[in-house]
Image: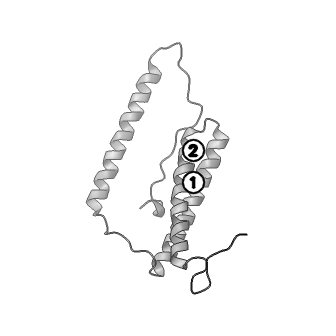
Amino acid sequence: MYTQSLSSSGNFMQEQDLLKSILADLRRTSREYTTATTEASCPTIRRMFNDLTNDTLRLQGELFNLMQQNNMYSVSSKALRTDVDKQLQSAQQTQQKCQQFIQEKNTQSSPYTQAPNVPQHQPSYGNPYYM
């Protein structure tokens, strides 16, 4: 028979430990949904995983804010805005190079050339849960 060990307060785990576990699961889930989004070839399935990713990120952000307000989660030191801008600029340059590479490959004649089967992903800048 299953028995459950209880802490001194009668709960299975302390609230802070439980919330940290849920927060970690939300982070893991959002990574898995992101992978599923990038692997999906059907636009409908891709959209579904994209929506699930966004919902999971929203929940993760809300839980993080709740934990932070209740002093259950300490935040690492803040990043300098210049460092963030530098990383963003580097990522944008990489994205531009990738798009140029894809355009070059798409314009070359090949018997195996095929148009993409999903629309181009639009960046979601400004989402408060990404920083």
User: Residue 56: horizontal and vertical position, in percent?
Assistant: 58, 59
Left or right of 120? Residue 10 is right
- The residue lying at 61 percent from left, 54 percent from top is 52
Q: Is residue 56 left or right of residue 73?
A: right
Secondary element under disc 2, as helix, strand or loop, is helix
Residue under numbered circle 2: 37
Q: Quadrant of the C terminus?
A: bottom left
Q: Quadrant of residue 25?
A: bottom right
Residue type highlighted by circle 2: Thr
Is the residue 58 above or below the residue 70 in the image?
above
Give the amino acid type for the residue marked by disc 1 in the picture. Thr
Q: CA distance from mark 2 to mark 1?
A: 8 Å
Contact flag, marks 2 and 1 (Cβ < 8 Å): yes
Which image quarter is the N terminus in? Answer: bottom right
Q: Is residue 130 above or below residue 104?
A: below
Q: Residues within 10 Å of mark 1 (few under 14, many from 20)?
A: many
Q: Which mark is residue 117?
A: none
Residue 31 as seen in the image, left or right of residue 81: right
Q: Residue furthest bottom?
A: 9
Q: Which residue is mark 1?
A: 53
Q: Residues within 10 Å of mark 2 (few under 14, many from 20)?
A: many
- Judged from this view, the residue extending furthest toward the right is 1
Q: Is residue 102 above or below residue 25?
A: above
